[in-house]
Amino acid sequence: MAGAGGGQLLDLSTGITTVVSEHGHRDGSPAVLLLHGWAGSRRSFAALLPLLPQRVRAVTVDLRGHGDADKPTTGYDLPTLAADVIAVLDALGMPEAVLVGASSGGYVAQQVAVTAPDRVAGLVLAGAPRDLRGLPPFADELAGISDPVDPAWARTFTAGFTDLDRLPAWYVDLMVEDALRLPASVWMASFDGLNRSRPPTDGGMITAPTLVVSGARDALLARDQTAAMVEAIPGAEWIEYADTGHLVLEEQPAQLAADVVSFLAELAGDGRS
């Protein structure tokens, strides 16, 4: 069934409805499922997708509360978000996929890899945290938002994650539009869910081949947090992009696309595809 924005509507076994969009050949193996960050949507990958070869089957999905997905006031803890992702794989008939997670999407991807290791052929974690417990500097701002969310605030808030002048104007507009689609209740519920969840690598072992990509100028996540995540994932490879902040996906789509393609080729060479 067609969904909003030309995507496919999925009724998930977890009780919510969401939308996915597919790119590349359906026979591409392994399939790649891309998970956006907080306050984003499946459109977050708009700059990266055209840079992936058509042989790659890439699927983007709106996570609970975001984009065209249902927006309940509950269910934003990591185990529930991971269950949604597994339900997406089920609904699409995918036995396994490589998960590419941007920012908090990488946090969700880690939880999927711990919860259902047989469903994860590999992980690419771009600007992803190891642990989101503890209140960040912007927590007080969130406590004061209400509906309708102020567009000027959304743009200023987005600018707190990167220098917007480093991004194309169309992409900044897309990011702000996506942020404005979150009701105030979902802003708070999704933040609290991530903030209160146990880090995935504290609860289990990630066995999937993993590529970690971070920005050398990431002002949101300390470099030692990325180092701790790499240490917690056996065999993880770490690439650090120079002159790049927290939003690796948004700031370096071409480099990230190239590294994703190289990672997929390594998996194929290992006989995992």
Image (cartoon, grey):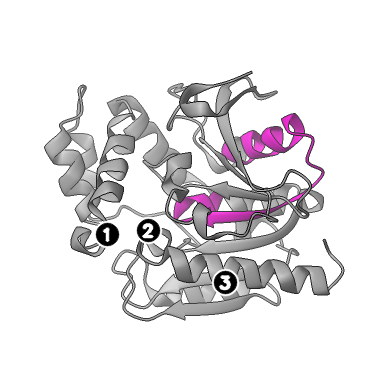
First of labels 3, 1 by sequence position: 1
From what the image shows, is residue 152 above or below residue 70? below
**Marks 2 and 1, how far apart in space?**
7 Å
- Is mark 2 in CB contact (under 8 Å) with mark 1? yes
Q: Residue at x 48, y 59 (%)?
A: 131
Q: Is residue 37 visible?
A: no
Q: Residue furthest right?
A: 271
The image quadrant that residue 154 belongs to is: top left
Q: Taking 150 as reference, is 217 above or below it?
A: below
Q: Residue at x 46, y 21 (%)?
A: 72
Q: CA distance from mark 2 to mark 3?
A: 15 Å
Span highlighted in magenta in the image: 81-108
- Where's the C terminus, which quadrant? bottom right
Q: Which of the pair 37/131 is nearer the observer?
A: 37
User: What residue lies at 23% left-to-right and 55% top-to-bottom?
Assistant: 137
Identify the residue under disc 2: 250
Label 1, secondary structure: give it.
loop
Name the residue nearer the viewer: 111 or 36: 36
Q: Is residue 206 above or below residue 69?
A: below
